[in-house]
Every structure is written in C-alpha cells, then in structure tokens.
C-alpha cells in the first residue's frame, strides 16, 4: 500500500485514488475520471498505450467552464 501524498498544487484533504487499470479474466481495461471504462485489451501495455492516446485527445478538447 502506498502512502497518500498531495499532487502539485493540491490543497486540503487527499482524495481516494485508485489504479486506472484493471484486469477481468485475462483482458485489461482502463478507467477515466469521467467514469468511462475502455477495453478489453490483450495486455496492460496495450491498455496503457490506449490510455495515453485517450488523454492526448482529451487534452485537445476545449475546456468547459
């Protein structure tokens, strides 16, 4: 178990955090903060690559205030 730490710029209570990756049977998935689960992927490495592509796309979306 890892000790909880603040991320850069965070103040206040440290929120619960979990791993974005999970395995069901022998298939891998990733979860987003928005509650979206993506998969299945053949292995964790492919899930990780897909998460990086997803984050790259999300980064380019206009922010909604």
Image (cartoon, rainbow, N blue to C red):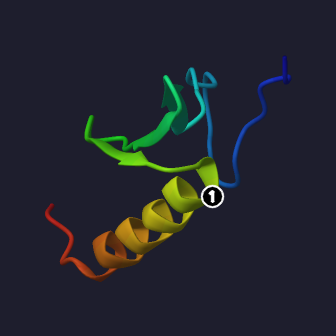
- Residue positioned 34% across, 46% down in the render: 39
Pick the residue in front: 16 or 56.
Answer: 56
Q: Is residue 18 above or below residue 62?
A: above
Left or right: 52 in relation to 2: left
Pick the residue in front: 11 or 22.
Answer: 22
Left or right: 51 in relation to 60: right
Task: Look at the image and tell me in which quarter the N terminus lies.
Answer: top right
Residue at numbered disc 1: 45
Q: Residue 46: image x %, image y %?
A: 54, 61
Pick the residue in front: 48 or 11.
Answer: 48
- Residue positioned 27% across, 34% down in the render: 35
Task: Look at the image and tell me in which quarter the C terminus lies.
Answer: bottom left
Q: Residue furthest bottom?
A: 60
Left or right: 10 in relation to 59: right
- Residue positioned 58% across, 27% down in the render: 18
- Residue positioned 57% across, 20% down in the render: 16
The part of the image, by quadrant, that contains residue 54 is bottom left
Pick the residue in front: 46 or 42.
Answer: 42
Q: How many dots with numbers?
A: 1
Neighbor class of circle 1 (other Cα within 10 Å; few <14, some 14-19, many 20+) is: few
Left or right: 28 in relation to 40: right
């Amino acid at each position: 178990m890892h000790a909880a730490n603040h991320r850069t710029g965070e103040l206040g209570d440290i929120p619960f955090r979990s791993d974005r990756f999970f395995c069901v049977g022998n298939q891998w998935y990733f979860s987003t903060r928005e509650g979206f689960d993506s998969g299945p992927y053949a292995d964790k490495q492919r899930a990780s690559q897909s998460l990086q592509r997803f984050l790259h796309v999300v980064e380019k979306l206009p922010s909604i205030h």
